[in-house]
Amino acid sequence: MLQGYKVTDATRTKTCGIACSTLKELKAKACLKFNVKNADEYYFSLLDGTIVDSEDYFSSLPPQILLIFSKPTDNVLMGADIIYNAFKAVNIEFLRTGQMVKGFFDENVKEKVRILANYLLKSGDAEDNTLKSSRKDDPKWFEGLETNYTSKEAFLRRRCKDRISGYFYKAKSDLLKSQTNLTEKKLTEILLNRLKGQLRKCDFNGGYFDRKDNACLCDESGFFKCSGAWNKEKCLYLKSRRHIINPYASREERIVFSTWNLDHRIEKSRTIIPSIEKAVKSVAKDGSCHDLNYDLIFSLLFTSENLRLVHIVCHDKGAHSTATLEPEKFLLKRCNGIKKDKG
């Protein structure tokens, strides 16, 4: 059935109405409207940056929605940019007022986070305190934080530890809540104790956010880059520098960075936890033939082997359908008392 959609280009200088029944048909007609010959280089996105890359997702969109037709290298003028420019033309200061700020963030959070990010990128007239570390040298950065934090690195390390710790306690709750078999419960408790001990040894991987740590996910000055959606090789917005941030630079960037996510490519709740439960049942059933692959479980739950640091726009909360895991991967085969990989 034909439905109408509005399609615009990266610069938002031209908008066309197109009637179609499939995403493929829409692309073909958009190429004609915008005189595009290399169709494979173009894609559709929503105003918040969400990429429309499948027929299933396209069919869920309402008619007359505005779609942006562009290339990954285009500097796309999103809705947030237009709103930002309007705010700036009137008075950017009102963004800082109490009730207005509260109301401003009540809806369309993704869109409005981008407004803040753009504001940060465009306000280059402030003193550059990026490389300063202590509360004494950059007191404004620490406004609103507990007084026990004396360095930027210590605060961001703590924030990362809190996230990883949250993953552990959520996994613990999920694994223990439905168990009635005593053997399986004991095996799970052993697993959890092993995982917690390993987390303590690596300081809950807090170094991922600490620019002075060898394990940090940023460069030496503190710039973090979005890794892109779970099913992409890289972030599509890096070339336009949209999904790059340095929380060490200012208080505002520190606050915006809190909206970035450590996203499990192979999902924790939908895939990893159910696979662990099946592996535990298998070990409980076959006795001494197998043991749990503690290192792999730890890696997938708590390390950058499976965690991707992503901008809120690239954080897909839908099912990561092709990032699968066989429960057998969590098993190690025993042979004469020596553990061997089942594979």
Image: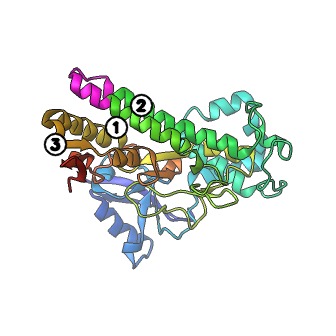
Q: Which mark is on residue 170?
A: 2
Mark 1 touching mark 3, by CB under 8 A? no
Say what amino acid the circle numbered 3 marks.
Cys
Q: In the picture shown, does residue 192 fall above or below 259?
A: above
Q: Spatial distance from mark 1 to mark 3, Cα to Cα?
A: 27 Å
Residue at horizontal 31 percent and vertical 57 percent from the top: 54
Q: In the picture shown, does residue 240 fall above or below 101?
A: below
Left/right placement of residue 192 relative to residue 249 reads left
- The residue segment tinted magenta is 175-188
Q: Spatial distance from mark 1 to mark 2, Cα to Cα?
A: 9 Å
Q: In the picture shown, does residue 265 fall above or below 102?
A: below
Viewer-nearest of labels 1 and 3? Answer: 3
Q: Earlier in the sequence, mark 1 or mark 3?
A: 1
Reading the image, the residue beneath label 1 is 269
Q: Which mark is on residue 289?
A: 3
Q: Secondary structure at mark 1?
A: helix
Residue at horizontal 50 percent and vertical 35 percent from the top: 165
Left/right placement of residue 250 relative to residue 183 reads right
Say what amino acid the circle numbered 1 marks.
Ser
Q: Is residue 96 magenta?
A: no
Mark 1 touching mark 2, by CB under 8 A? yes
Q: Is residue 184 magenta?
A: yes
